[in-house]
Amino acid sequence: MTIQSAAYATLKAAVGFAVLLVGPAMAATPAASFPISDSSFKCIAEMTHVRHFYVDNLAGDLAGTVKVAQAGTGDYPVGSVLQLVPTEVMVKREKGFNAGTRDWEFFELNISPASSTIRVRGIEDVNNRFGGNCFNCHVKAHQGFDLVCDNNHGCDPIPITRAMSGALQRTDPRCKNPPVSAEDAAALGQLGAIVKALAAAKPAAPASAPKP
């Protein structure tokens, strides 16, 4: 198996673990004032890189999204897309969508070299691949950060380093990636160990009752 294939396998394992943690996908939320579908999400490298994450805007105001991302504070415009890793997305919906999340909607994606598909989407009940609830983490961001987390924004720490998130970004299977560097291979190996440890720590499902 090549390093590139191993990176993709690590990402698929992490996503598969998320399925166990979150369960079946929820019913779709109401339609946005701009369309949100599987095709809304693309190779992360095709988005705009700001600091350690990527941004886009589904409503056409990319300049507004980039401005807030670069500043690090302020309210993101409607349609903003923020991604730290290829499988997790937050999208700023239309005004009044949900006051509790400051109008953000959270998405978990299944990705492959051929496509992106929305596995689960929602407001306060979407969990990431490590079992952390997206809203419960982001709601702890200090005032002025528009529910966006960073190392100093007040959110709980996550078990993924900048090296790991960067390696996942550079091995997004939807992208035409160069060979995986030794540094990224090491970071992905560390991430794989975390995923395995979390999977091992997950309580076993109760045995089903025997049939009469």
Image (spheres, helix red, strand yellow):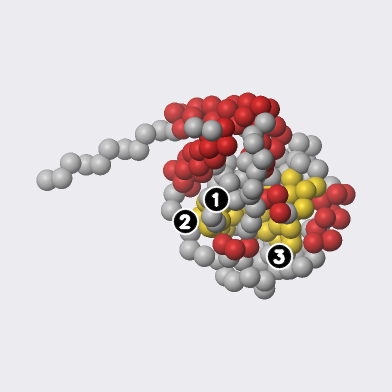
The C terminus - image quarter: top left
Type of amino acid at the residue the image marks with label 3:
Leu
Relative image position of residue 13 (x, y in whole percent): 49, 38
Of residues 135 and 18, the one nearer the viewer is: 18
Direction from residue 99 to residue 198 in the image, left or right:
left
Distance CA(mark 2)–CA(mark 1): 22 Å
Type of amino acid at the residue the image marks with label 2:
Ala
Q: Residue at x 57, y 70 (%)?
A: 30
Q: Residue at x 56, y 62 (%)?
A: 38
Tag 1's secondary structure?
Answer: loop
Q: Which residue is mark 2?
A: 25
Q: Is residue 35 above or below residue 162?
A: below
Question: Residue 98: which quarter of the image?
Answer: bottom right
Tag 2's secondary structure?
Answer: loop
Direction from residue 140 to residue 198 in the image, left or right:
left
Q: Which residue is mark 1?
A: 113
Q: Pointers 3 and 2 in contact (CB under 8 A)?
A: no
Going from the N terminus, do you reach mark 1 or mark 3 first?
3
